[in-house]
Image (cartoon, helix red, strand yellow):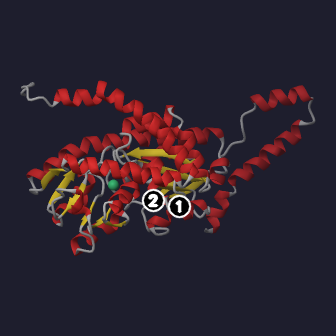
Amino acid sequence: MSKNDAKTADIGSEKGLKRRDFIKKATTTTLAATAVAASSFPKPSLSQGRMKWRMQTTWPKNFPGLGTGANKLAEFIGRASDGKLTVEVFGGGEIVPAFETMDAVSSGTIEMGHGAPYYWKGKVAATQFIASIPFGLNALEQNSWLQFGGGQELADKVYLELGCKFFASGNTGVQGGGWFNKEINSLEDYKGLKMRIPGLGGEVVKAAGGNVVNLPGGEIPPALSSGAIDATEWVGPYNDLAFGLYKSAKFYYFPGWHEPATLLDNFINLKAWDGLSDDLKAIIETANSYANSYVINEFVANNNASLDTLVNKHGVVVKKFPDPVLDGLGALAGKVIGDLAAADPLSKEVLVSIAKFRKQSIAYAKFSEQAFYNARGLPFKWVDL
Ligand code: CA
């Protein structure tokens, strides 16, 4: 930490001192007058204490959808706070290696990080259940669970173990199934397959006999092109096109059963968070709410066009995982997820909550979105403009 950072990190206590000075002076008046003054007098100005925080993302700097979402988050905080709190954004590796971002935030080296919860499963296993669950909730359902199903409280409990405050700060929606150089016709085809696939999906592929590795985004294209890995998933058409994954793999499979909706996490060093005034806390909450919708909207808007480019410009062969493969992966997912949750009480608490929400979501989706998608996909002629 530089001298300047040490200075900004002390601002919370500096403000506290000023407030104490004010209360000390006020004791010369009557108790009643003090109460009135304390409630009506403007809080001490932060003009001498403008805070500058640093946020490292796990993503390459300005990466479409993921990095740009983090940029929007930082921009919003600076603008809404009128510069009281500015957040400088660093790409993965600019301060510490991408996967050490959480260590840097937990230890207070930097105040904020932006990534995906499953990157921290080695530290706190339950984070992978917050990120995305194979055959679990979609983005709409996941956000509903966070806001109304007790999810935010559970995620905060999980991130407390990391010394951080948690915010959902973006969502990819359902991802692509991955890039393969050989066809997946049965579960047997996963045996010995060296695949980059993180989180619980990776555990499922491992259970199917795959040789699973995890790599930060920036390391995927060279690993696939050099043959260090046979297959990879990344995000979806928008990001996968940007990485040029089509140059090194023949088949693009769907759907992304392993990540039906991966949320991005904004994690804040708990001491830094606790030291904020209420207005700045509210601004950060709102900024994350904004980033959360901004990111998924960016994905929806760009995935359509990117899939079209991949298929019609680059000749990518798009293939659906056969239903028996999906059925087999679903059964393996249930076993793997259940075993992991049984071994860790915090993971189990999260999974029990999500499983309850999922059960109702499945019933309601058949009545709503799923039924509508089926209806919209019928081969009638619609407007032709
Ligand atoms: Ca992914």
Residue plotted at (70% across, 51% down): 12
Type of amino acid under label 1: Met
Q: Say which quarter of the image contains residue 180.
A: bottom left
Camera-near label (1 vs 2) is 2
- Provide residue 138's location: percent of width, then percent of height: 36, 39
Whether residue 202 is visible: yes
Mark 1 neighbour class, 10 Å CA radius: few under 14, some 14 to 19, many 20 or more: many
Q: In this orientation, which residue lies closer to the viewer: 4 or 69?
A: 69
| Disc 1: residue Cβ within 8 A of ligand 1's nearest atom | no
Mark 2 neighbour class, 10 Å CA radius: few under 14, some 14 to 19, many 20 or more: many
Residue plotted at (57% across, 49% down): 346
Whether residue 115 is visible: no
Type of amino acid under label 2: Tyr
Name the disc covering residue 355, or none: none
| Disc 2: residue Cβ within 8 A of ligand 1's nearest atom | no
Which residue corresponds to mark 2? 119
The CA distance from mark 1 to mark 2 is 9 Å
Q: In this orientation, which residue lies closer to the viewer: 249 or 11?
A: 249
Which residue corresponds to mark 1? 102
If the image is split into quadrants, where does the C terminus sit?
top left
Residue plotted at (26% across, 67% down): 193
Are the residues flagged by discs 1 and 2 in contact, CB closer than 8 Å?
Answer: yes
Task: Give the left or right position of residue 3, taking residue 64 as reference.
Answer: right
Residue plotted at (75% across, 32% down): 41
- Provide residue 66's location: percent of width, then percent of height: 37, 52
Q: Say which quarter of the image contains residue 40.
A: top right
- Provide residue 30's location: percent of width, then percent of height: 92, 29
Q: Which of marks 1 and 2 is nearer the N terminus?
A: 1
- Provide residue 122's location: percent of width, then percent of height: 50, 63
Helix or strand or loop: what does disc 1 sit on?
helix
Q: Quadrant of ligand 1?
A: bottom left
Q: Say which quarter of the image contains residue 362.
A: top left
